[in-house]
Image (cartoon, grey):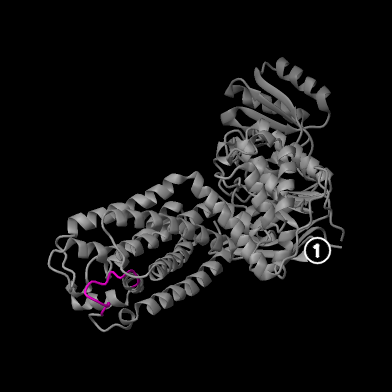
Amino acid sequence: MTTVTETAGGAPAPAPQARSGVSRSVRDSLVVAKRNLIRMMRIPEVVIFGLIQPIMFVVLFTYVFGGSINIPGAPVGDAQAYREFLMAGIFAQTVTFATAGAGAGIADDMHKGLIDRFRSLPMSRGAVLTGRTLADLVQTALTLVVLAVVALLIGWRTHESLAEVLAGFALLLLLGYAFSWIGALIGLSVRTPEAATSGGLIWLFPLTFISNAFVPVNGMPAFLQHVAEWNPFSATVAAARELFGNTIGGRTTSVTGAWPMEHPVLASVIWSVLIIAVFRTLAVRKYRSATA
Amino acid sequence: MPGAIYAEGLVKTFGDVRALDGVDLDVPEGTVLGMLGPNGAGKTTAVRVLTTLLRPDRGTARVAGIDVLAHPDKVRRSIGLSGQFAAVDEYLTGRENLMMVGQLYQMSGRDAKRRAVELLERFNLGDAADRTAKTYSGGMRRRLDLAAALVVSPPVMFMDEPTTGLDPRNRQALWDVIQELVAGGTTLLLTTQYLEEADRLAHDICVVDHGKVIARGTSDQLKARTGGERVEVVVHAPEHLTVAEEVLRGFGKGEGTVEPHTRKLTVPVAGGAKLLAEVIRELDIRGVEIDDIGLRRPTLDDVFIALTGHAAEAADGNGANGGTGVAEGAGDDEGGGTAGLGRQKEGVK
């Protein structure tokens, strides 16, 4: 069969280039990531609202709860101790909000027929989702920078080397990246962007509150202590706290003897990688059969 | 040799609904197949299967000679899809949209950029190239969407209701583009609810209803199935219906219809304009006052009603089938199975 490559437009279109699987996948993901970053720049209000919420949390928690929460090992009512304790928790909670962004973005693409367009193109299967999660990673990093500056302004301090502090932020970003894959799956599974936003947020509240993020676990009922210490979210909070040198009264210790609390850095990496592996697989599979 | 688009026995069910119930298609290279059917007939499902977006439960399909189920990725290199919604990113400019699609068709950045410029000019979007698609009118978005489908000049194109929701001027403009494209040798499968559109653009038409192809042929062949021309009369007062019916029976060469609520009578005739003049004279002599009279040739609307027992429902108020008057019957007949013009009307003996 002869194929007609001439259009009424005149010159024949350039032939698509053959690419190997991996390089195609990387390139396609970057093309999609660029598209999402351009969108973010053109809808700055999304980024700005994404910043206001964590800043509000920092201020509210610090000044409203700060004087009433006792950090083990610190003097009673030591607001500075709470400030240092709190920040890793706020950072971690902030990165998990990437879930809602990824979910809403992908649901919106489905809704507008863009996912159909992408699926009809000879592009790598995972690229639409990878591109989206990469763009969210950039946004999360930006948010963390601004939030860290605000934290420094109200008195947050780190007490470890720069390398360790950066490692702490790297773990936070990894957690955020992992959570944006959960968001991707939610976005592909719901009918509207609105549903993806609320579906991406509601479960984050119990997840981030039943943890070591905002209050020390030792004040919780025994049952919740177990939940909190095995919560994947707690591992990253503990790890960041340790790498920032914000563990008041020495090294992080577990109340219940949970393994992740004894080895927070390793546990944080394991949890995040596991979440990515599971949710990326599920999301890409879902994408292959996605119907708007 | 099978055509550029070929399908055999496609079946796809969603729960209890058989969206495709054994669809066969064969579109020779360089021709246009118009797939005609009401909402929910299975047109979009067929397009989704052929464009690799959906796996059928049963059946086989080949596009540009490539097996759709075995090598979907190869098929995607040879097709362009323009869907029911303008699938463009509204926060990207026209140029950025086309460049992105080009790169995802695996073009180099430079080629994608050059192609974007060409297409923007060709689709009369040159001035709007660097504005975000959000600022585009509906017609411009459709043109951009179509341009995106043409980035690699695919040999096979699928357009799913390309003009639904467009105003007449934009619809006309899009038809011109499609005709140009086909003149260049592209094979096209076009779905539409607008009979005029299929009549105008397609070499062959297949009529789809409830997931089945219920008729196929050229526009003329399909029209021939509903018979020849007819005289249609609207009388001024209901009491004139009986007399008018008698008169028409005298001229008619087959069973006609009466619609009492619209005071409209229709009867098949042979004899053209000359006969029409005679009918008018006779009605005048018999004292029948008429509001409207005309000689009507069958349209695809008539074909559709004859085949499916219900009219093609227009998706919006300003449907392209305006003026042919079939839409009025659509509301009171939900999926009636009986074919024929006499349905729900009283036959003229």
* Position above or below: B34 against A222: above
Q: Which range of residues does the magenta coloring cover?
A: A243-253
What residue lies at 31% left-to-right and 61% top-to-bottom? Answer: A90
Q: Is residue A245 magenta?
A: yes
Q: Quadrant of residue B122?
A: top right
- Disc 1 residue type? Gly
Which percent across, then down, holds residue B302?
A: 70, 40
What residue lies at 69% left-to-right and 61% top-to-bottom? Answer: A122
Provide the major secondary structure of the magenta segment.
Answer: loop
Circle 1: element type: loop
Q: Is residue A172 magenta?
A: no
Q: Quadrant of residue A121?
A: bottom right
Q: Quarter holding the N terminus of chain A?
A: bottom right
Q: Nearer the viewer, residue A288 or B35?
A: A288
* Position above or below: B195 against B70: above
Q: Nearer the viewer, residue A274 or B206?
A: A274
